[in-house]
Image (cartoon, coloured by chain):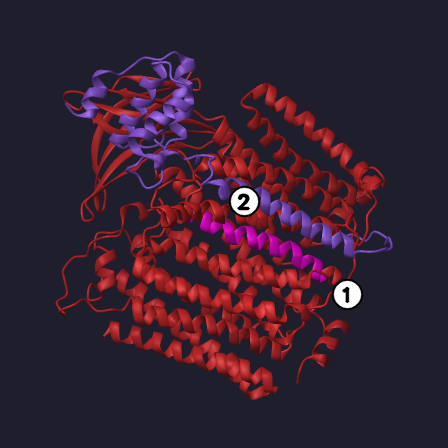
Amino acid sequence: MISAIGTFALTLALLLACLQVGAGLAGAARGNGRMMGVAGTAALFQAFAVALAFGLLVQAFVTSDFSLLNVWQNSHTDKPLLYKVAGAWGSHEGSLLLWLLMLSGLGAAVAGSGGSLPAPLRARVVGVQGLIGVGFLAFTLFTSNPFTPIPGGLVPPQGQDLNPLLQDPGLAFHPPFLYLGYVGMSVAFSFAVAALIEGRVDAAWARWVRPWTLLAWSALTIGIAMGAWWAYYELGWGGYWFWDPVENASLMPWLAGTALLHCALVVEKRDALKSWTVFMAILAFATSLLGTFLVRSGIVTSVHAFANDPDRGAVLLVLCGLYTGGAFLLFALRGDRLRPTGVFAPLSREGALVLNNVLLSVLLFTVLLGTFWPTVVEVATGERISVGPPYFNAVSLPLLALLVLAMAAGTFLPWKRGRGGDLLRRLRLPALATVLAAAIWFMLQGGSPIALAGLLIGLWVISFSLFDIARRVRLREVPLAQSWRRLGGLPRGYWGGTLAHLGLGIAVLGMVGTSLWVSEEQAVLAPGESLEVAGYTLTLERIYEARGPNYLSEVSAFTLSRDGKELAELYPERRWYLAAEQLTTEVDVLPRWASDIYVAVGEGRGEQREARVVRAYHHPLVYYLWGGAILMTFGGILSLSDPRYRAQRVTKRRMAHAATAPA
Amino acid sequence: MTLSALLLAAAVTLTPVEAARADALSDSLRCVVCQNQSIADSDAALADDMRELVRQRVAAGDSDEEVRAYIVQRYGEYVLLRPRANARNLPLWAGPGLALLIGAIVMYLFARKAKDVPFEDEEDA
């Protein structure tokens, strides 16, 4: 029953998506208002149909309806409720449905969003959004239907359980955010394709696209951070970023999205970099598709890919190729129609933003190259090689250093044309502050030259951002009370950007602390024995067994002390998931502002297996990392809430746009 | 006698400097049975063996390069997380620099197009 309704809902959604494409694109081309209206309605009902299907799947997981193959494969009656719900998107089929939910939801949101968007442009965006939906709905229905009934019709009494590594709050919420980020880029893509069809991009277009891009970027930022956080305490060795193909797959759209946010500013303020911005919008979604595909293709090995299948991955590759290739073809044919009117000198904010985009693109290319190079080599020569963190770190650090210099230049230079002397004068104090702070910190903490470079980069970003705020409120030029008033008067878009920059600087400091100042100790401990890490004493008190809802656990109780004073008790576990027959390591972390103490317990040692392999880490500045990511996300959302993107008043420019729109 | 038994029998002690070198080397070598972990990070028994092997080579006075060559000889080039800078990997190592060069050319073209642009009063946004 549920299988039939679910499949019906998805089929209906597919038909509605087809209608949405036809009515939207043809309606806009003919200037037929009724057809364009039909496209919007279709988008709305398509979203309802997909939401119904998604709701049904969640319901099936919550009630452990094992008549569905997918539920049987990925759930278990003993699983806690949260993971039953999260199980709905823990598999390939379910995660695709979540992806579709976001896609159709965003399509409906564009169709129903505030009134200033001209009808033909809206219909085209909705139509292109529908076109993406057609491909992926068909793919889901024909190859990955989550509503496939269990073969034979006999309902098994018990399911096979979700991969225990995924039974974690961090990972329950990580995919929805990441997907919102990936799929959110589809709106920018649809706007770009619609602009290519119309042959026009202007400031109003940039303002309409920006909130969607900001939404996607913010979701992607927090999604990536959650993935890193999950890896940090779930995979059990204290790392959070491994330059793993799947992590790289999420970084690529983030880099492209970041570039897009910056070049779209130039379109909005200065009516230049138009075709460039359209190209970036297509690239951002293309890399998002690559991210979706890479996770499930099995073409690369990864610690994160849990729902992969090479055969279907190949079909997904073809789909991605069609959409991306089609958009780039359109770009090649019509991109030159997007004529910029704004001119700018090289030494200007526009110039710095071009440099920003070039550097982000090079970084994106590097990540792409490093991720696929092992595959290229294996296909060409049959040899297997690896491209790991040493490569990516070596290449990305210099690029990051250049990028933060461009950031500062873009912040301090005026639009159109700047004066070198002014720029240097404005950079003097932030540079001095950075060098001083980095030197003091480096002397206190020590470390490698890389640590010093990282400190300089992070502190530089923080420093120039703060100095820029001071400059804008004319601190010390005007009375303090007036500066204070000016502070409140700065637009939200400015605050958003500044907080995001500050977040990046803080996160870079976190990376320096966690990867370069980390101390690690490993020892075999029996109860009563202890080890020392970074001046802390960690004592294994006892080992006991416990039972969870769907696992057995061996808990090791530790006390953490410093100079004889007890600070905390830590309880890392080793869990045996009964249904999945899988062992997991659950670390315990004492999170603190300055540093985390992190303990993981490995296998038993000794004649009676009375001792355990214990790994303890002292991770300085982990909070900076998470805090920086949260600040970046917050900056994105704050910028999104800037009134200039909401309910735009009917301006002259928009009137002009509507008047010249092909009728 | 299995390899791991042999290794456990021969566990070596290192000076702090040597231990640091061995740790750094372990960071740059990939565990061949794990999904994507260095042998320093992995809990796998094989990673244990490989770590011990590294420590033995360090104790025996091998240079970093010799230790890597030794491990590669046994486990293949796959274990190197930092790919070799050889002719085959030239595109990998030269790619970013080349992309940056192309970017610089793009920037130059942009700059050349911009002729006399007037200064504008600074308005903050």
Q: Colour of chain B?
A: purple
Rendering quarter of residue B101: top right
Q: Which residue is mark 1?
A: A341
A181 and A270: which is toward the camera: A270
Read off the magenta span: A246-268
Q: Amino acid at mark 2?
A: Gly
Q: State the residue at coordinates (51%, 81%).
A: A39
> Is residue A258 highlighted in magenta?
yes
Residue B123 image offset from top left, x and y in percent: 81, 53
Q: Along the horizontal axis of the image, is A418 left or right of A230?
A: right
Q: Are marks 1 and 2 on the same chain?
A: no
In what element is the residue under mark 2? helix
Q: Is residue A659 above or below residue A2?
A: below
Rendering quarter of residue A590: top left
In what element is the residue under mark 1? loop
Residue A606 image offset from top left, x and y in percent: 18, 20
> Is residue A212 highlighted in magenta?
no
The chain to which mark 2 is attached is B
Q: Along the horizontal axis of the image, is A112 left or right of A62?
A: right
Q: Which residue is mark 2?
A: B95
Q: CA distance from mark 1 to mark 2?
A: 34 Å
Residue A90 image offset from top left, x and y in percent: 32, 55
